[in-house]
Image (tube, helix red, strand yellow):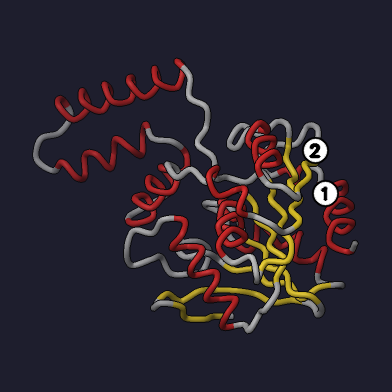
Amino acid sequence: MKINIENIELNYICEGEGKDVLVLHGWGANINTVLSIVNLLKPDFKVYAIDLPGFGESEAPKEIFNSWDYAKIVKKFLDIMQIKKVVLIGHSFGGKLSIILGSEYPEVVEKIVLINSAGLIPKRGLKYYSKVYAFKTLKFLYKAFFFWTDEKKGMEKFYRKFGSSDYKNAEGIMRKILVKVVNEDLKPILNNIRCSTLLIWGNKDTATPLYMGEIMEKEISDSGLVVLEGAGHYSYLDDFNRFAIILRTFLLN
């Protein structure tokens, strides 16, 4: 189904009947990556999932969004659907949006489930800064020796060759949005969340490492962290059977 919010056409699905649940996917993903969660919950809940702007079948933003802009779009979606109380389930970037919504709209958010959530600035040691310095040096040399006439096209080629996987996969305005959102730190607003919050994490996650979940558990007053041993960033897919038991127990009690 389609809906237009702030002149952006969004794709969404709605399955089942009962209490309202909204599932938010991660960066670079879409509805299809969270369908297993939708199918798990639809026998007992009314489950919504949306393709966030710029992903799946939804249009990209017309301007450079930050995470709060994305959260505003999600809140307007809830308003249009006349959802007064909602359970938010967010994976990665979707978790980050759930944190913002839980912090800014406590009257709407009943429970939150954060799955390998983004939202914290990662610890950056010597190895990180060495890589940044090497990247900037390589960029300077590439720019100086490999092209002279079409700088924009040349830098596009450089980033596709040497940038991160998310950066390589992003195009146009979505690449600029990525640069903005990865540098946002939500730690100061975590203690604003008052609803019951479940954190589910894979201990092998390298994108949003486990220590981030531990920090979130400490900062969110009514929260608990469950670690899925051997699971990675997509922990809910890596260990779906255990994930399903944990999620249903939390939501149905």
User: What secondary structure is found at the residue carrying circle 2?
Assistant: strand
Q: Position of residue 5 (x, y in %)?
A: 46, 78
Q: Secondary structure at mark 1?
A: helix
The residue closer to the viewer here, 78 or 164, is 78
Q: Which of the two discs, 1 and 2, labels the residue nearer the N terminus? A: 2
The residue lying at 55 percent from left, 42 percent from top is 187
Crowd around label 2: few <14 · some 14–19 · many ≥20 (10 Å) = some
How many C-alpha atoms fall within 10 Å of the one at disc 1: few (<14), some, or many (≥20)? many
Q: Amino acid at mark 1?
A: Phe
Mark 1–mark 2 contact, CB under 8 Å?
Answer: yes
Vertical placement of residue 144 versus 159, above or below:
above
In the rendered structure, the answer to whether residue 176 lies left or right of residue 3 reads left
- The residue carrying mark 1 is 243
Instruction: Quote the CA–CA distance across marks 1 and 2.
Output: 8 Å
Q: Residue at x 62, y 64 (%)?
A: 31
Counting from the top left corner in percent of width and height, residue 33 is at: 65, 56
Q: From the image, tell me which residue sits under label 2.
A: 228
- Taking the spot 89% from the left edge, 64% from the top edge, the residue there is 252
Q: Quadrant of residue 60 in the image?
A: bottom left
Amino acid under label 2? Answer: Leu
